[in-house]
Amino acid sequence: TQLLEQSPQFLSIQEGENLTVYCNSSSVFSSLQWYRQEPGEGPVLLVTVVTGGEVKKLKRLTFQFGDARKDSSLHITAAQTGDTGLYLCAGALETSYDKVIFGPGTSLSVIP
Amino acid sequence: DTGVSQDPRHKITKRGQNVTFRCDPISEHNRLYWYRQTLGQGPEFLTYFQNEAQLEKSRLLSDRFSAERPKGSFSTLEIQRTEQGDSAMYLCASSPVGAGRPYEQYFGPGTRLTVT
């Protein structure tokens, strides 16, 4: 059983469309990170959220941390082909903040 | 480039052989992590170090796997008597401690291991 679930597992959209991917858990996290990974490369950190209800924006990407710090979402506006990749959420548990647990990822494909 | 580096990027080996991978973290980072990632999955925690001390090792890690960080700088991950199930991407990450964010990890490009 995954401690962090991500949905959808796969997403294929046309360039210019909007999308939201989700990261859910029954556990409380002291912080949550989103990474993007391209094939054959390591994950690249996009953002960290630490406060329940926090919203952060990174250009066309909007990240939200749930009020109870058990879930998060990533919304992309006007997707571009360069957004294609594997989006991973990762959380540091309150009980073990120095070890990060990764979700299985959402594979996004943006078609021109 | 002051990012995390890993060597080699690709390794093909025959079943039963030993392999060793190297990771050089960002120089001022004192935490170093090893992960394994298979296709379609997120990174799976293997072990981590603070300076030269190995603080935790995953229960999923068999005794064929060993990691060292002898001087608190670079680290090596050795797999003895490789099996086909060891085929995966092995990722290294580092993070600073004392900056309030030990959970923010910076990854290297990974070593792709194929066991034939």
Image (cartoon, coloured by chain):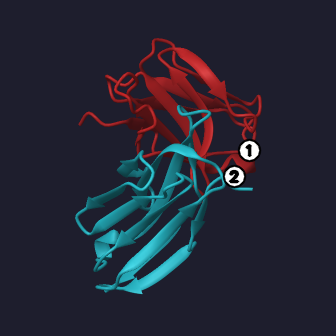
Chain colours: A cyan, B red
Label 2 crowding class (10 Å Cα cut-off): few <14, some 14-19, many 20+? few
Residue placed at 40% from the left, 49% from the top? A49
Q: Position of residue A103 (x, y in %)?
A: 58, 56
Name the side, left or right, on which A12 lies relative to A79: right
Question: Residue A75: percent from the left, percent from the top?
Answer: 38, 71
Query: Can you say whether B116 is above or below A22 in the image?
Result: above
The answer for which chain carries disc 1 is: B
Task: Identify residue for label 1.
Answer: B15
Q: Name the residue located 53 percent from the left edge and 26 percent from the top edge.
A: B76
Question: Which three-letter amino acid code belongs to the residue tagged 1?
Answer: Arg
Chain at numbered mark 2: B
Label 1 Cα crowd, 10 Å radius (few <14 / some 14-19 / many 20+): some
> In which quadrant is the N terminus of chain B drawn?
top left
Which residue occupies the foreground of this view, A75 or A14? A75
Q: Secondary structure at mark 1?
A: loop
The residues tagged by marks 1 and 2 sit, at their Cα atoms, a distance apart of 6 Å
Q: Are marks 1 and 2 on the same chain?
A: yes
Q: Is residue A19 visible?
A: yes
Q: Height in image: A17 above or below B84?
A: below
Q: Residue at x 42, y 32 (%)?
A: B94
Up the image or down, B111 lies above or below A88; here it is above
Report if the CB atoms under discs 1 and 2 are less than 8 Å apart: yes
Residue drawn where x is 26% and y is 33% of the image: B2
The image position of residue B27, as x and y in percent, is 32, 24
The disc labelled 2 sits on which kind of residue?
Thr
Q: Which label sits on residue B116?
A: 2
- Where is residue A112? Give x, y as percent: 31, 86
| Quarter where residue B48 is shown | top right
